Amino acid sequence: MRVAGRITGEAILIGGEMVRPGISTKQIDEKIRHHIEKCGARPSFLGYGGFPGSACISVNEQVIHGIPSYDKILEEGDIVKIDVGAYIGGFHGDSARTFACGKISEEAQRLIDVTKRSFELGVEAAGKEGARIGDIGFAVNEYVVANGFSTVKKYVGHGVGHDLHEDPNVPNYGTPGRGARICRGMVIAIEPMVNMGTDDVIELKDGWTVITKDRKLSAHYEHTVAITENGPELLTKVD
């Protein structure tokens, strides 16, 4: 899983380096696919449930599952979520980051920063003795709400392994001390999806793209996290 995670993390960074005004989301997707396949892996998302891209690339009010397109051209001030998975040796990696396209607003940058920090707090909660799934979601949501944003409730993190999505679900909200116990050997994707406005979302007619109901910005941050005897290990972190 460390190999799958490393390839996934590298692909995310390659995609992020391409984020700039004038480039299409499909061009980013193609570069990501090339790197994953060059490493001897395959894109986890390509064909998954019929998804047509190697990465989900979601811009601004798009929360997740944005379909890469030559027609979607990035503009100055956009925030771009890149979600990638790689499959090799029977295991998946899964990771997402939000990137700034050129100069973005201070509030957009704060949204990105709060989303990343909420992830970090979720990981810290997962690493505590006797932790449960509810502790992760509580830590994430408490920080997000304290900063004036909202966490998406409809979509959640999940286990990762032989399958891209496994039990347990890992919501970005919860009650401390509730839910499945977090044990050594578990591998989970912790992935806060944080909205600038309401937590309500809508799935578009393409059957994939999810947007905020109020069309305000959304950010996403995710790593595949292994629970080891030495604490949580981010398998998809390479930078």
Image (cartoon, rainbow, N blue to C red):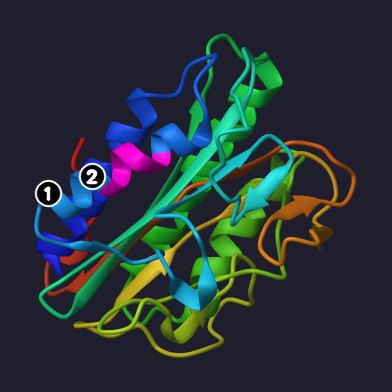
Q: Amino acid at mark 2?
A: His
**Label 1 Cα neighbours within 10 Å, binned few <14 / some 14-19 / many ≥20:** few
**Which residues make up the magenta segment?**
29-33
Picture residue at 45% right of the left edge, 81% below the top: 132
Q: Which mark is residue 85?
A: none
Q: CA distance from mark 2 to mark 1?
A: 6 Å
Of 69 and 107, nearer the camera is 69
Q: Amino acid at mark 1?
A: Lys
Image position of 208 with respect to 100: above or below: below
Instruction: Give the side of residue 209 with respect to residue 5, left or right.
Output: right
Q: Which residue is mark 2?
A: 34
**Residues at circles 2 and 1 in contact by the CB criterion of under 8 Å:** yes
Image position of 138 with respect to 120: above or below: below
Instruction: Give the side of residue 42 with respect to residue 178, left or right.
Output: left
Q: Secondary structure at mark 2?
A: helix
Q: Which quadrant of the structure image shows residue 222?
A: bottom left
| Percent position of residue 19, x then y | 45, 24
In the rendered structure, does residue 58 fall within the stretch colored magenta? no
Picture residue at 56% right of the left edge, 86% below the top: 178
Query: Which residue extends farthest front?
Result: 70
Picture residue at 39% right of the left edge, 55% below the top: 54
| Percent position of residue 42, x then y | 23, 63
| Secondary structure mostly seen in the magenta stretch | helix
Query: Which residue extends farthest right?
Result: 214
Of 13 and 52, nearer the camera is 52
**Label 2 Cα neighbours within 10 Å, binned few <14 / some 14-19 / many ≥20:** some
**Quarter that holds the C terminus:** top left
Q: Do we see residue 120 in this rendering? A: no
Q: Do we see residue 9 in this rendering? A: yes
Q: Secondary structure at mark 1?
A: helix
Q: Which mark is residue 38?
A: 1
Q: Which quadrant of the structure image shows residue 2?
A: bottom left
